[in-house]
Amino acid sequence: MKNICALLLVLLLFVSVSSLQNASAQATARTDVYHVHFAKATLGKGAEEGDFLKKQGPNAPMPGHYIVLRHQSGEDWDYAVIEHLGIVTNWKSHSLSPEMVPLAT
């Protein structure tokens, strides 16, 4: 009887330690932010568009963490750019000036 109680106590201890480790692993899960951009090149300008998209901006949050994919045929887009922005990012919204807004006629 003592052996069974000791065995159950050890088993309970292992289960509780395992559940604590899983809870702490789930609490530290990261959520990363990615920016995905689809681009369509004008007729005959695909190579120039590709060269332009391969250059990452100088103030990128994570330099070197991007990929440029080229679609060969059949879709409405030619290039897809996926850029890793990190865990947290700041997003700037630019508002249009009144002269840039098209007038309804």
Image (cartoon, rainbow, N blue to C red):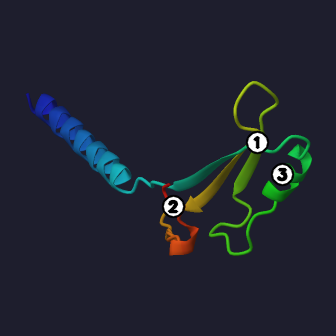
* Tag 2 and tag 1, C-beta contact below 8 Å: no
* Tag 2 and tag 3, C-beta contact below 8 Å: no
> With 95 as the anchor, is 41 left or right in this view?
right
Q: Which residue is mark 3?
A: 49
Q: Foreground residue, 41 or 29?
A: 41
Q: Residue at x 77, y 34 (%)?
A: 71
- Name the front one of labels 3 and 1: 3
- Residue 41 point in image, percent of width and height: 80, 45
- Residue 21 point in image, percent of width and height: 33, 49
- Name the front one of labels 2 and 3: 2
Q: Which residue is mark 2?
A: 103
| The N terminus - image quarter | top left
Residue type for callout 2 = Leu
* CA distance separating discs 2 and 3: 31 Å
> With 71 as the anchor, is 18 left or right in this view?
left
Q: Residue at x 45, y 54 (%)?
A: 31
Mark before the other along the chain sequence, 2 or 3: 3
